Amino acid sequence: MTYKQLIISTLTILSFSKGLSQKVADSTKVNKLEEIILTATRTERQLSSLPLPVTLISKKKILQSGTIRLNEILNEQTGIITVSDESGFEGVQIQGIASDYILILIDGVPLVGRSAGNFDLSRLTVGNIKHIEVVKGPSSSLYGSEALGGVINIITEKPKSEELQGNVSYRIGSFTQQDINMDIKQRFKKLRYGFFANRFSSEGYDLNPDLEGQTVNPFENYTVNGRVYYDFNDKLSLFTSARFYDQVQDAGFTFNDVQFEGDSKEREWNAHARLDQKWNEKFTTSYEFYYTNYTANERLADPISDDVLSDSDFDQKLLRPEIRGSYAFAKAGTITAGLGLQYDQLDRTFFDETVSFNSQYIYAQYDVNPIERLNVIAGARFDNHSEYSNQFSPKLAMRYKLTDAFAVKGSVGYGFKAPDFRQLYFDFTNSAVGYTVLGYNVALEKLQELQEQGQILDVVVSEDDLNNPLEAESSVGYNLGFTFKEGKWNSELNFFRNDIKNLIDTRIIARKTNGQNVFSYVNFDEIYTTGFEINTGYKINDAINLSAGYQLLYAYDKKKQQDVENGQVFARDPATNQTVAVTQSDYFGLVNRSRHNANFKVFYDIASAKANINLRLLYRSKYAQFDTNGNGLIDSYDTSFIDGFLTANIAASKIFYEDFTLQVGANNLLDYTDNNIPTLPGIQGYIKLNYQF
């Protein structure tokens, strides 16, 4: 029996289970607790009362949907798109802002290890997650660099019961994809502990058999996480966590008819300790220490001659202590403040030496209700960095409750992203093609070395152009939203605008005698993203929940938009083979941005059968991957467009013998594939068995 036949058969059985149409007994009803958010304000706040655009993804939804990696569950949320880079890794895009500018946290502390600025979300398993919090828009007033476009915070679960609790699960799916989880947790009066282990592997797949090698090569990875909590008394508590991730993946590349083979390895350590002290009912403090280390290595060699094609290493370390406190005034709001320092170091093959950054920061936030129906949050942060100019990041947000069901909220904030190690210190020459890429801080010195070696034909920039420091990228973001929640309905509409300046990109600084170019980095682009998103949910009864979401997005480069308006951009019309001026209607916008994104979800709980089934439909309209006609922008004459497509994900679960849960499902049920989308290999069926104790 094939995966597809197994899925269809099981779903049919579940659909006709006894009592399918029976109403849920009143005794099963429970009062739903308000969802609590930490990321948006760094204090506990009810989700429904926040003046900021925030998405919360609950553990229940993660389990019911059958997702096992972070990229899968995020891709199903409105206004959040996962986009593959040239390496096949999926980064996240929020409000049209790329992965480079989205900060990824676990329990409030950042993760490192990005490929060309992109964070690979598939590194993170969701097996021990309590919930995921996503704050949209600039969040640098609390989190500093990389929070220009938003923050994603993964919250792990704190043990509550004195009985040993946990679960063990095994899942197998298409392409021999296997996911094995073990999660245990317990409380002993003052002591609590949690331990989680995951193994994830696949034999990979190939979307284009005409080419050598596979689209995704075989891999296996392991994640281990241990957490210990200790309550010294009711006013002093300690949280400690250690996490380890290790992955090995086959690698292969064909060059000059020689098949080079090897592997790529990734390893990550995180250590986190936090001491929380409650001085009295009004004043609390937290003392936090965090260290993480991410390493990656890839080696490709001819298996016969052992000639090495490439051998690269990446070793990044981050150390961050922080102190913060919160004081609640009597009927006058709450002030939260913190200070800390950050030391960031990277040793990489394409750097001359180990390089490091250090920065000191301080932030403060005031959360107040000046009148009963109005909530105001004002905050700011100051960052002093060793490699770029100081940054001041303010933010203001307000929410006004017009009625018990209807509220309006708005926010404006400043975000920034510091130039990264690659943009400042890169020294790379492609041995096959011959071009060179230099980081800004080493460009002048390396260019002089190339001139002395007789490799430079012409320098196209002045020395002064390479002496001015590279500026941090920055953004001002605006959000205006409306929320409605009454009875069975809940809806949220949010309009957004993000203006980004000093965008860092490559430019040609010299031409080599071999006909290739020397590139470096420069601040020049100004872009903006704007649009709106709407989410709505309707609870038909205690068993059936419907939800839908839609985002309209416009994302443009301001200078290129002006060039088009001035008639300075041209393209060749393939229909007439004539050169024509590109018009405003021809200018599509930035790469990898879809104008329309939508989702529709149905969740059906069958209480009498101890089962549930859900269907999630995801639509993404057309987008372009790169400029094909050489005019520097994406227009209607380009040929790299990927047509809009619809994917359907389905999952069904049933509880047996109280403690066992069987889940079957399929992602990409419509079997959509495209050679340009390496993360969509067609239908991916799976079956999972979970034992909970």
Image: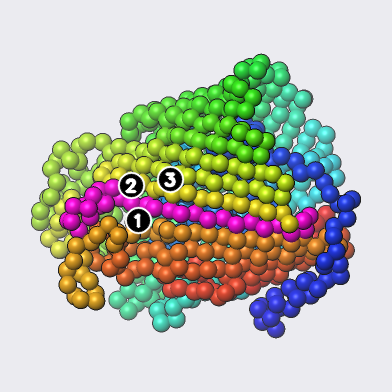
**Which residue is denoted by mark 1 in the rendering?**
590
Q: Quadrant of residue 177?
A: bottom right
Q: Residue at x 21, y 66 (%)?
A: 571
Mark closest to the chain's N terminus, 1 or 2: 2
Q: Which mark is residue 527?
A: 2
Q: Which residue is drawn at 57% across and 25% down?
A: 367
Q: Using the rendered image of the protein, determine whether residue 442 is visible from the camera's viewpoint.
A: yes
Where is residue 335 shown, x and y percent of the image?
57, 22
CA–CA distance between discs 3 and 1?
15 Å
**From the viewer's perspective, is residue 643 above or below residue 154?**
below
Mark closest to the chain's N terminus, 2 or 3: 3
Instruction: Judge the density around disc 1: few (<14), some (14-19), many (≥20) Cα neighbours within 10 Å.
Output: many
Q: Please identify the quadrant where the C terminus is shown.
A: bottom right
Discs 2/3, front: 2
Where is residue 429 shown, x and y percent of the image?
26, 58
Q: Which mark is residue 101?
A: 3
CA–CA distance between discs 2 and 3?
13 Å
Judging depth in this view, the residue of 638 and 199 nearest the camera is 638
- Give, as a single range, the part of the protein colored magenta: 541-569
Where is residue 104 shown, x and y percent of the image?
52, 45
Query: Which amino acid lies under the numbered mark 3 shown in the image of this protein?
Result: Tyr
Q: In which quarter of the image is residue 326?
A: top right
Magenta stretch containing residue 566, yes or no? yes
Q: Residue at x 66, y 43 (%)?
A: 485
Q: Which secondary structure lies at badge 2?
A: strand
Query: Which amino acid lies under the numbered mark 2 shown in the image of this protein?
Result: Ile
